[in-house]
Amino acid sequence: MNLKTYLEEVKKGNVDLQEETAKILEQAEKINQEYHYLNFISKDLATTQSKQSTGKLAGLFLSVKDNICVQNIPSTAGSKILSNYKPPFHATAVQKAISEGAIIIGKTNQEEFGFGGFGTNMGIGFETPLNPYDQNRATGGSSGGAGGLANKLPHHVAMAESTGGSIEAPAAFCNVFGFCPTYSRVSRYGLIDYANSLDKIGPVSTDLYGAALLLETISGHDVKDSTSSQEIVPKFTDYLNKDVKGLKIGIVKEAFGEGTSPDVKKKVEEAISKLEQLGCKIETVNLPLVSKYGIPTYYLLATTEASTNLAKYCGMRYGYAEELKGDFNDYFTHIRSTAFGKEAKRRIMLGSFARMAGFRDAYYLKAMKVRTKIIQEYKQALSKVDLLITPTMPILPPTFNEIKQLTPLQTYMMDVLTAGPNLAGLPHASVPVGFSKNLPVGMSIIADHYKEGLVFQAAKEFQSH
C-alpha cells in the first residue's frame, strides 16, 4: 500500500492507529539494532499521539533529525556536548507536522552538528549508520539516519536538514527522495544551527507524495524566524499530477566531467534520456564559477558560521558539563576538547581562523562576494531553462575502508555537486535513478527560488522506477 492510499485509509477509519504505531515502533527498534539509524525512539510520545492523530498528516509516521528540537525528547545534534539536552519546545516545523496529525517515532542519527558528507564523522559515543544495501558502506551524511530509515520503514517520512548536501547525499546513497527547499521556505526556529545562512529543513522518503505533503505542511512564514519567507506556499502535491512535456532541462556540463564516476554518469544520462522521451527539451549549460569556486566558498562560509554558533557550547547552561574547577577559560577549553569530536574541532579552528582580525577581509568577505557571483550564475542559467540536472554524488556509496584512506580535503570535495545549489539557496532534490553494481545512484534536479513544484513535477516521473 503506497503512502497516499494508506493515509486515505486512516482518514476513513480503516486503520487501527494504536496497533499500527506499535508495529512501526517494533520495526524501528529492530532496524535500529542492525543499522543504527536512530539516536532515540520516542515510544511514549508516539503512543500518545496515535490516540489523537487528526489532520492531513493523520497516521503519518515521522522521524526527526537529531538537530531539530522535539519537546522533552533528547535532541543532541549527534554531539556529546549536547548529551541529555531535552528542549522545552518544539521546532516550528515539528509543531506544524504534529498539528496536522504526524506521529513522532524518534530522532535520527547524524554526523556531529552535520559536519560531513559520508555519515562517518560521528560524535563521541554515537554509532555510525550503515548503508541499507551493504553494511560495509556509508549511508551518506550528515542525515544518514534519515536516509537509511526512510529506505527501511513503511508509512514514514523523515524530517531532515541540509547545509551543503546533508539531505541529498544520504538520499542518493540510500535510494530515496531527498528534498531540499528554497532557503527560508521552512522556518529554522528550533533547528540547532550549523551555518545560519545555509541550513534548510526538508523531507526524505521513498514516497514522493509523502515528501510533497510534508513539505507543504511545514513551509510558510514564522514570526519566530525573521529569515523565513512570506512567499505563498503552493500545494506541492498538485504538481505530482502534471506531466513534464515542454519543460526545458539544462544539463550542467561540468558535473559530468573529471571526478564523476562513469557508473554514476551512465545512470544519470539514462535518466536524462527518459525525460527527453517524455517530452522535455534538453540542452547543455555551463556553470564554471560553481564548478571552480563552489567548494572553497562553501567551506569558508560554513565553517566561519559554525565556529560562531558553536561558541555557546561551554558546559554551563545545558548539555555536557563537569564540576567547575579553576577559571572559566580553563573549564571552557576542557569541556570543548573533551566533548567535541575530531571533525567538529577541525571546523571550529578553520572557521575561527577565517574570521580573525586580519583574515576576515581576505577569506570570509571575499567568499561572500564569490557567493553572490555564484547565485548570479545560477539565476542566469535558470532564466533560459526550467530546471538544471547533475548527478547528486560523484561516486557510488563508498566502503568505510575507502573513506579511511581519504584526506579531509578529499572528503570535502565529495560535496562538489551539492555545495553550489545550497550556497545559492535554490530548491533541489536527489531522485533515485537506478542501480550500478547493486548500489543506488541519485540525480539532482535544481530549480529557481520558490519553484519547488517544478522539481516535484520532474521527480515524479521516477517514482515508479
Image: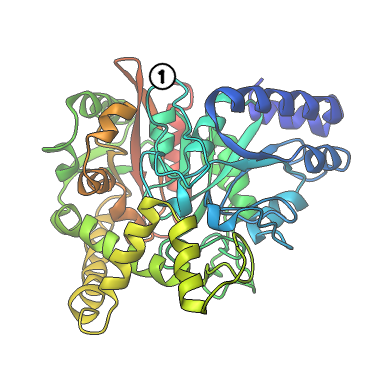
Q: In which quarter of the image is the C terminus?
A: top left
| Residue located at (77% from left, 53% from top) | 99
Residue that mark 1 sits on: 134
> In the drawing, does residue 214 fall left or right of residue 169?
right
Q: Taking 187 as reference, is 70 above or below it?
A: above
Instruction: Specify the amino acid type for callout 1.
Output: Asp
Residue drawn at x 28%, y 55% is 420
Kindly identify the residue that appears in the image at 17 percent across and 52 percent down.
291
Residue 160 position, x and y percent, is: 53, 46
Residue located farthest toward the bottom when viewing the structure as drawn: 357
| Looking at the image, residue 288 lies above or below residue 36 | below
Q: Where is residue 269 in the image (x, y as percent from the top left)?
A: 23, 28
Quadrant including the N terminus: top right
Relative to the observer, which residue lies in front, 146 or 373? Answer: 146
Residue 450 pos. (x, y %) = 45, 59
Q: Visible in this render: residue 398? A: no
Coordinates of residue 165 in the picture (x, y in percent):
37, 48
For residue 45, say whether it is visible: yes
Q: Nearer the viewer, residue 344 or 416?
A: 344
Which image quadrant for residue 324?
Answer: bottom right
Q: Is mark 1 on a helix, strand or loop?
A: loop
Q: Report the number of discs.
A: 1
